[in-house]
Image (tube, rainbow, N blue to C red):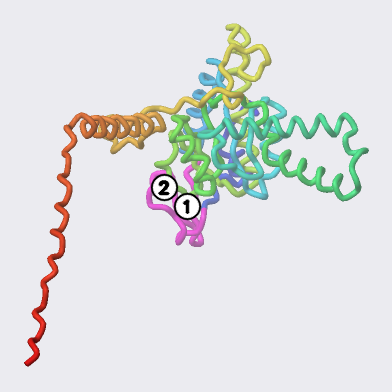
Amino acid sequence: MSDLSVQALIDAGAHIGCRVGRWNPKMAPYILESRNRIHIIDLKQTIRGLLRAKHFLKQIVAEGNDVLLVGTKLQLSGELSKINVATGMPYVEDRWIGGTLTNYEVIGSRIAYLEELESQEAEGHLDSLTKKEAARFMREKRKVFRNLNGIRSMNRIPGAMIVIDPKTEMKAVAEAKKMGVPVIGIIDTDGDPDVCDLIIPANDDAIRSVAMIMSYLADGILAGKEIRAEKGVADPQAAGSDAQPVGKGAPVPRPRAAKGGGRRRPSRQDLVAANQQVEIKSIGNEDAADAAPAVEVAPTVDAAPAVEVATPEKSED
């Protein structure tokens, strides 16, 4: 998609917002008017957001970074996979798995597990299984494939994230914020624009609207890949890339909290150091107790032997 016009967005239904009762007041600058109790999005703001997002994605990809595409709405199933075929960028369209960015070591192990299942199937491992075991094997493979196939080529933290309806993808946006990943959001009138770094106000439910916007953003990604190839920047998805892999045994670097941002959660090293200090203090107390002179307790004086008192016998008259 090379050209972008207001009429093309209107034909795709990108200007149709949500009902007036569902709107978020923070989206007021991006709303043109309301008709039949339905908000109409200002498409000038949409085009402005698209131009900014395309330029930003072009720079991010040219520097050698990837862009993660996130959109798990049922009606949008298959749209992100088309963008993946065109651009080669990782995507999540079935379900966002908690820890995809913040705990990629575990996600990387699950991707290795998926590759192991596929290799077993290719080697004819199913022939040695019973019918019930083979059905269980294929069910497990389909489940893991559905959840992880889109991100199996992502070997490090992406440089940016495109989210369709951040209100639905709250977990993905929260992880991106925690890892310092910029978020480009396609937001309807019921969303919160503060959770995104770049905002594209548009209808995030219509298939044609989302497809047109994602196609335009894909042009920016492809332009960035061309610049990357001209500069000779290593592709992060290439096998021989110098980029440090994430999830293949390497810990994920987490950004430090800003000063004055509250109390820092103690790390594992802090807890181990604190336990060692406690042990040192306890050992010191024991040494002090050993060094102190032992106080001998005087034995208790034995009771005096009982004195038998002879009772005088009565004299017989």
Q: Which image quarter: residue 120?
A: top right
Residue 242: percent from the left, percent from the top? 59, 11
Q: Looking at the picture, which amino acid does disc 2 mark?
A: Met
**Quadrant of the image containing the N terminus:** top right
* CB contact under 8 Å: marks 1 and 2: yes
Q: Residue furthest right?
A: 127
Residue 8: percent from the left, percent from the top? 61, 38
**In the image, residue 27 lies in the stretch drawn in magenta:** yes
User: What residue is pinned by disc 1?
Assistant: 190
Q: Magenta stretch? A: 18-43
Residue 263: percent from the left, percent from the top? 29, 38
**Quadrant of the image containing the C terminus:** bottom left
Classify residue 71 as left or right of residue 143: left
Residue drawn at point x = 59 percent, y = 43 percent = 96
**In the image, residue 107 lies in the stretch drawn in magenta:** no
The disc at residue 101 is: none
Residue 232: percent from the left, percent from the top? 60, 7
User: What residue is pinned by disc 2?
Assistant: 27
Q: Looking at the picture, which amino acid does disc 1 mark?
A: Asp
First along the sequence among labels 1 and 2: 2
Classify residue 274 as left or right of residue 188: left
Q: Is residue 266 above or below residue 42?
A: above
Q: What whole-number distance in Å separates the C-alpha atoms at marks 1 and 2?
A: 8 Å
Residue drawn at point x = 11 percent, y = 74 percent = 310
Of residues 18 and 132, the one drawn nearer to the viewer in this rendering: 132
Of residues 315 and 161, the one drawn nearer to the viewer in this rendering: 315
Q: Element at badge 1?
A: loop
Q: Element at badge 2?
A: helix
Of residues 7 and 213, the one drawn nearer to the viewer in this rendering: 213
Q: Decide: few, some or many residues near mark 1? Use Cα within 10 Å; few <14, some 14-19, many ≥20.
A: many
Of residues 13 and 190, the one drawn nearer to the viewer in this rendering: 190
Q: Decide: few, some or many residues near mark 2? Use Cα within 10 Å; few <14, some 14-19, many ≥20.
A: some
